[in-house]
Image: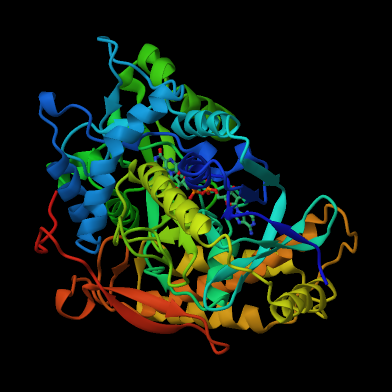
């Protein structure tokens, strides 16, 4: 029997969603104990790298209004967002911005001393609330500081969760303490999955290396649906050659995109919004420019375009874009004050995730999901920039409160852990992976998979490429690769990586099956063989369920409360 740690609420993940959920749960009920379990140290969660802003309507007296934020979000989503969810996001956000302010968030200020907001793509008003170009770092620090004020929040840093324990409701998780290598079970009547996005299934990616889909895969293997996984966001400005992000705030501050003729080519594609059209529109325009020969050659072999910020002037750049200036100098050898920087669309966000309802509840009673790991359908087929940190904060708060209440009312539920499941999980990871029989290098498998995703499931997709990618990923999955070279018990990152790769392959398969099945172009999913949006057949969410033979798909309706779909023009 493995050792067991008991709490009332388990929060898996310590990014923005996890920390906001922890504060909310702790504040809802001081008498429950909350565990925040994270495979990395708190301040290494990917949320720390959010750069540009957090969306909210703050200045109605200056002309902004919530209805417009709701509409921009729905239009940005190509009408696949659930409209009640978009409404909840928008209505909840102003409070959260001021709440963060009261907890010590150093928001950038306007000259009149009020909180500053900048323009972001797809919005009708400047709504991206920022702290220089390091918004995630400051938000994380503010939330972490606030967590430390509650003695009922317990952090388990560098613990790797491997599976969900369940009967007809949530019972807990299994996890490995990375430092000691001990395998244990956590037990609680309530849980929240906040394990972030899965963008490392691509090679050219803005994500931290830890952004692998192990949390999604845990839910998938536990019988829960993944929703809308085919919608992957490609951000227009990943720098060459690394893919590190240049925030959309750079264009929000007035930056231009130029082709090799020196033209601001967005004039052709989105004359109304230019460089501040939504990301899917800008990324497609960039790839068209490149495909038609108007890109810049780059030594990597990938053509690119340039982002010109030189006209903003050194003073403004140093004041509000200092972080990306440093990134440009260190990783591209270019000072954005003096010259345009080379960029190309890069994997940046997963609109899909664990299927939840408007409250963040999953299909399993007692289990919620929040943040990028969840798909409550705020963003539909394409997220607007700055709406993700907002989503993390809003559904962190909502799910934290609901999980705390659920835990308090189910405290007496004798959660006796399912020994059989724990034993099977131990067998899966120790016999199947740690002492696995593979001889192919797992890191080669990962590279082959992420390169395949880059090549064949990028900004533009078609049947031939997607089918070839699926074949390749299935071949890789079927190869004898699952083994761990390093046999150490303590701090075995090789073992952790191999478990991550295992989940990456299953998730890539879900993305590809969903993309093949969606024979239309909507938001970030652009099919050259089905270039038109097809509301008759595809105005619905994709659900994918795990089976031993691969994902099984189903459909789920979109919630309409306010706006009928119209053609999207910018
Ligand atoms: C470079 C970059 C810049 C961005 N800029 C912005 C921006 O300006 N505005 C905006 O709105 N959005 C932005 N985004 C998107 C946004 O930052 C993310 O969607 C959001 O921060 C995700 O937060 P999260 O809490 O869901 O998860 P994350 O912050 O990704 O954290 C995931 C957590 O889960 C834990 N975890 C994962 N797997 C396991 C496991 N198996 N066991 C235990 N723990 C696990 C990790 O340790 C981590 O703590 C940006 C994203 C990137 C990559």
In the image, residue 165 lies at what x, y percent? 63, 71
Q: Residue 146: x and y, percent?
A: 53, 30
> Which residue is drawn at the image coordinates 25% and 10% (left, top)?
112
Residue 204 versus residue 130 in the image, above or below: below
Q: Position of residue 209 (x, y in %)?
A: 62, 51
The structure residue drawn at horizontal position 25% and vertical position 69%, both measured from the top left corner, is 521
Decide if residue 418 is on the left or right side of residue 329. right
Quadrant position of the N terminus in the picture: bottom right
Please state if 437 lies on the left or on the right of 388 as rendered.
Answer: right
**In the rendered view, how is the structure colored?**
rainbow
**As drawn, is 327 to the left or to the right of 258?**
right
Nearest the viewer among 50 and 287 is: 50
Q: Is residue 92 left or right of residue 506?
A: left
User: Vertical placement of 245 versus 536: above or below?
Assistant: above
Task: Quadrant for residue 64, please give it.
Answer: top left
- Residue 36 % position (x, y): 61, 48
């Amino acid at each position: 029997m493995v050792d067991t740690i008991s709490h009332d609420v388990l929060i898996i993940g310590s990014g923005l969603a996890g920390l906001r959920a922890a504060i909310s749960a702790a504040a809802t009920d001081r008498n429950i104990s909350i565990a925040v379990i994270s495979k990395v140290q708190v301040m290494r969660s990917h949320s720390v790298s959010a750069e540009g802003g957090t969306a909210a309507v703050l200045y109605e007296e200056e002309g902004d209004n919530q209805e417009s934020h709701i509409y921009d979000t729905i239009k940005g989503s190509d009408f696949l967002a659930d409209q009640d969810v978009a409404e909840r996001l928008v209505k909840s956000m102003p409070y959260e911005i001021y709440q963060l302010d009261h907890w010590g968030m150093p928001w950038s200020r306007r000259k009149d001393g009020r909180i500053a907001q900048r323009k972001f793509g797809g919005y009708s008003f400047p709504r991206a609330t920022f702290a220089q170009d390091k918004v995630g770092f400051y938000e994380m620090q503010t939330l972490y500081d606030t967590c430390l004020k509650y003695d009922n929040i317990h952090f388990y840093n560098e613990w790797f969760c491997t599976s969900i324990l369940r009967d007809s409701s949530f019972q807990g998780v299994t996890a490995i303490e990375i430092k000691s290598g001990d395998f244990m079970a956590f037990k609680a009547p309530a849980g929240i999955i906040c394990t972030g996005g899965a963008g490392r299934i691509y090679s050219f990616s803005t994500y931290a290396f830890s952004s692998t889909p192990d949390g999604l895969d845990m839910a998938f293997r536990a019988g829960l649906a993944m929703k809308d996984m085919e919608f992957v966001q490609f951000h227009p400005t990943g720098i060459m050659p690394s893919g590190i992000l240049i925030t959309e705030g750079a264009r929000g501050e007035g930056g231009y995109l130029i082709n090799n003729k020196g033209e601001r080519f967005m004039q052709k594609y989105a004359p109304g919004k230019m460089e501040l059209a939504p990301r899917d529109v800008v990324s497609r325009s960039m790839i068209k420019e490149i495909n038609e020969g108007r890109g810049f050659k780059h030594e990597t072999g990938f053509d690119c375009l340039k982002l010109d910020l030189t006209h903003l002037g050194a003073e403004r750049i140093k004041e509000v874009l200092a972080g990306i200036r440093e990134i440009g100098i260190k990783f591209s050898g270019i000072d954005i004050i003096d010259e345009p920087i080379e960029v190309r669309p890069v994997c940046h966000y997963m609109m899909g995730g664990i299927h939840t309802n408007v409250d963040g509840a999953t299909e399993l009673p007692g289990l919620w999901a929040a943040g990028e790991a969840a798909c409550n359908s705020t963003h539909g087929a394409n997220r607007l920039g700055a709406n993700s940190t907002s989503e993390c904060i809003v559904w962190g708060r909502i799910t934290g409160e609901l999980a705390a209440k659920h835990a308090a009312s189910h405290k007496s539920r004798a959660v006796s852990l399912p020994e059989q499941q724990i034993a099977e999980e131990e067998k899966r990871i120790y016999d199947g992976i740690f002492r696995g029989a593979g001889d192919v290098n797992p890191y080669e498998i990962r590279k082959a998979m992420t390169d395949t995703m880059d090549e064949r499931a990028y900004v533009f997709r078609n049947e031939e490429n997607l089918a070839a990618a699926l074949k390749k990923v299935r071949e890789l999955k079927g190869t004898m690769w699952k083994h761990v070279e390093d046999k150490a018990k303590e701090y075995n990152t090789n073992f952790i990586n191999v478990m991550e790769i295992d989940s990456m392959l299953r998730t890539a398969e879900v993305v590809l099956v969903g993309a093949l099945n969606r024979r239309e172009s909507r938001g970030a999913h652009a099919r050259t063989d089905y270039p038109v949006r097809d509301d008759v057949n595809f105005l619905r969410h994709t659900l994918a369920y795990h089976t031993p033979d691969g994902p099984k798909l189903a459909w789920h309706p979109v919630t309409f409360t306010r706006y009928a779909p119209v053609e999207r023009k910018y």
